[in-house]
Image (spheres, rainbow, N blue to C red):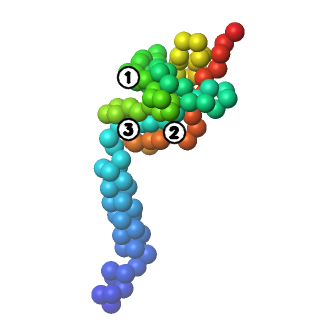
Amino acid sequence: MLKSIFINRYTIALFITIVIALFWNLFVILNDQGILHGRVIDQAKRPIEGARVILSEKTLLVTAPRDEVTTDAQGYFRFEGHKLYHLYLEAKKGGAGSASSKEVRLYFKGQNKTLKEPLVLELIN
């Protein structure tokens, strides 16, 4: 009788929910340093050194720049310590062109993220 009280579909569902919540919170704790990194390339897939990458936050009315970094020799960039969950990235370099604004949505504020697709600079005539 006591066994059937504690082991039924309701207690099993509650246990599973608690385990999922614990693992989710552990994942958030281990991945909320606000690290966002990616790469900037040109249309020929060559890395762009010295491109300005601008991280912007979209508010209700405007998109406001929050941080800016410059790419390294291999075209990589890295932001640290942002606390956003809906942001935009754009890249620019004089003579090499610019990349259109790329929207990035995260599951929680400050989530670490590596961009799968690079920002591609295009010359505008």
Q: Earlier in the sequence, mark 2 or mark 3?
A: 3
Q: Earlier in the sequence, mark 1 or mark 3?
A: 3
Which residue in the protein does label 1 denote?
67
| Mark 2 Cα-neighbour bin, 10 Å: few <14, some 14–19, many ≥20 | few
| Quadrant in the rendering for residue 34 | top left
**Disc 2, disc 1: CB below 8 Å?**
no
Residue 107 percent location from the top left of the image:
44, 43
Query: SS at mark 3?
Result: loop
Relative to residue 106, is residue 99 drawn left or right?
right
Query: SS at mark 2?
Result: loop
**Disc 1, disc 3: CB below 8 Å?**
no
Q: Is residue 120 above or below residue 34?
A: above
Q: Nearer the viewer, residue 103 or 47?
A: 47
Query: SS at mark 1?
Result: strand
View extreme (right): residue: 125
| Mark 1 Cα-neighbour bin, 10 Å: few <14, some 14–19, many ≥20 | some
Which residue in the protein does label 2 denote?
115
Which residue in the protein does label 3 denote?
35
